[in-house]
């Protein structure tokens, strides 16, 4: 089997080294501001100079961090069959779940504030998805829930809904302790499990330009101490929180991400780190974030190249963004543009790619299903084709000869179901489409997501683990 052997690139080797050399210059001379005293003390304890909150990171400290960060790692699910490899030698692009939307949309109820039921439905859809391999974060804010104890309740819902590898979220230190304890309980394991297995990842965001706020720092440190995967996600906007020129945004993004890498490795060398470019070219008429610009992908493909070719780090990108407000033609073309460009770059993991609308403000149940099909198409292309000697079909060609048909050959019968098939798109005739109800793709997606939810179990936990988790949540809320 041979997969795609070329990658979409925007830089040559000289460009990559220019970015890297200037990154070292800025880390050493301009530094990074950390609004977290603990982070500043960690840097100072390892020999970095600090001027109040600004830390100056020397080249040798960066190089040491790049040496200790894993080139790949196994991310474990509670079901061992769900465990994945991220980074070098992984077999396919992995898909992580969304984070951040506040509105839900579907064909029946329209656009509305997200609810607790929506949150659970999204977790269950992600668990049943054939393309989504990492579940978690907070894919919709549940507007109908009180804030007291909400973090624990959300995590309990996540653990009940899936046994795939998990993503957590930024939180206060006490809540993070609860988060790790609940994951440990769900795995039925001892307290040392986190030092041996990657179970729960997190995404932290610098505050561009060149600042790390306190809560993201505390979260990064808590995850690194337990040797759990950390992704640093810079979401700078060219001309607003980053230089207006694309190359300048690439540089700023690299400086911020590598500063986070150094901190994780100072806390606990060998902590898995995921390089996560997410910067964008905004709508400069409003200085507002947009997700559908092709130039944003150029910035982030450059970041993926740096991580892949110079640093040998696993990568992640937000890959199915659209600024469309409904599931329409704009949503389709921007989503496929972004998915194709980023998967073609060789990125290791993508997220924000299951149902996202309106610049990550809204998630649509129907678009979730449509996005799954788009991802499935691209993952099939990524896999490539069988290049074995048998696959050449020389004997079949000789057997049929000139002007014959391959339709009834044994080889055809054996392999005719190997070809990719859509879940939503209609490949039948017009008459067949009419006879089946003239459903548009979005209407078919509506039917599919409802059928999927009806088939999802209420919990994937055993009764004993369910009871243990329930007792813990009741005790701490």
Image (tube, helix red, strand yellow):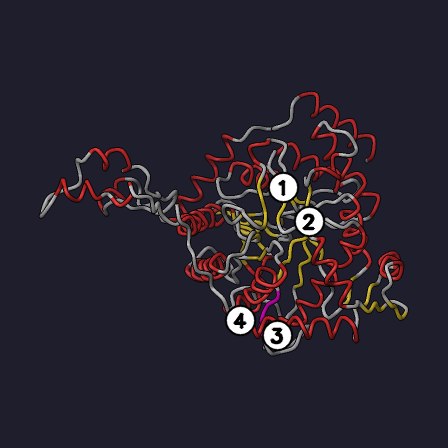
Q: Which residues are magenta?
A: 279-283
Q: Residue at x 55, y 41 (%)?
A: 126
| Residue 287 in view (yes/no) | no
**Left or right: 44 in relation to 96:** right
Q: Which residue is mark 1?
A: 75
Residue at disc 4, secondary structure = loop
Question: Badge 1, how many Cα within 10 Å: few under 14, some, many 20+?
Answer: many
User: Which dot marks residue 193?
Assistant: none
Q: Residue at x 70, y 68 (%)?
A: 255
| The furthest residue to the top | 464
| Residue 92 in view (yes/no) | yes
Circles 1 and 2: CB atoms closer than 8 Å: yes
Q: Which residue is mark 4?
A: 11
Question: On screen, 423 above or below 15?
Answer: above
Q: Is residue 282 magenta?
A: yes
Quadrant of the rendered structure where residue 181 is?
top right
Q: Which residue is mark 2?
A: 272
Q: Which residue is mark 3?
A: 286
Residue 153 picture location, percent across and down: 73, 37
């Amino acid at each position: 089997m041979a997969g795609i052997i070329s990658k979409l690139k925007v830089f040559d080797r000289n460009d990559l080294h220019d970015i890297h050399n200037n990154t070292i210059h800025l880390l050493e001379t301009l530094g990074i501001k950390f609004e977290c005293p603990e982070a500043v003390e960690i840097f100072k304890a390892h020999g970095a100079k600090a001027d109040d909150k600004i830390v100056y990171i020397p080249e040798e400290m960066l190089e040491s961090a790049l040496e200790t960060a894993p080139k790949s790692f196994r991310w474990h699910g509670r079901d061992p069959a769900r465990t994945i490899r991220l980074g070098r030698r992984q077999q396919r692009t992995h898909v992580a779940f969304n984070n951040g939307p506040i509105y839900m949309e579907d064909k029946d109820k329209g656009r509305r504030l997200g609810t607790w039921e929506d949150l659970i439905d999204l977790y269950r859809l992600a668990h049943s998805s054939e393309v989504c391999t990492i579940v978690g974060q907070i894919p919709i804010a549940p507007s109908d829930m009180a804030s007291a104890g909400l973090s624990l309740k959300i995590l309990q819902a996540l653990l009940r809904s899936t046994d795939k590898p998990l993503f957590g979220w930024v939180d206060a230190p006490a809540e993070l302790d609860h988060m790790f304890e609940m994951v440990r309980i769900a795995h039925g394991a001892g307290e040392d499990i986190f030092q041996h297995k990657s179970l729960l990842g997190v995404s932290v965001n610098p505050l561009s330009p060149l600042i790390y706020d306190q809560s993201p720092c505390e979260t990064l440190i808590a995850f690194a101490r337990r040797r759990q995967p950390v992704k640093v996600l810079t979401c700078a906007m060219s001309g607003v929180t980053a230089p207006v020129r694309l190359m300048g945004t690439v540089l700023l993004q690299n400086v911020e991400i590598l500063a986070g890498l150094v901190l994780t490795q100072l806390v606990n060398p060998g902590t898995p780190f995921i390089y996560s470019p997410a910067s964008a070219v905004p709508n400069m008429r409003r200085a507002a974030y947009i997700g559908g610009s092709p130039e944003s992908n150029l910035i982030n493909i450059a970041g993926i190249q740096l991580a892949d070719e110079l640093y040998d780090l696993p990568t992640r990108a937000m890959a199915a963004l659209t600024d469309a407000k409904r599931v329409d033609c704009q949503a389709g073309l921007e989503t496929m543009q972004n998915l194709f460009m980023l998967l073609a770059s060789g990125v290791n993991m993508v997220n924000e790619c299951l149902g996202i609308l309106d610049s990550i403000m809204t998630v649509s149940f129907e678009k979730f299903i449509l996005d799954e099909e788009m991802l499935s198409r691209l993952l099939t292309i990524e896999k490539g084709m069988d290049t074995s000697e048998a696959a050449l079909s020389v004997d079949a060609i000789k057997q049929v000869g000139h002007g014959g048909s391959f339709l009834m050959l044994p080889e055809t019968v054996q392999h005719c179901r190997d070809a990719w098939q859509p879940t939503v798109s209609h490949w039948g005739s017009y008459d067949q489409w009419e006879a089946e109800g003239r459903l548009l793709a979005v209407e078919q997606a509506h039917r599919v997501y409802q059928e999927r939810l009806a088939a999802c179990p209420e919990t994937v936990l055993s009764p004993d683990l369910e009871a243990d988790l329930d007792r813990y949540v009741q005790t701490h809320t």
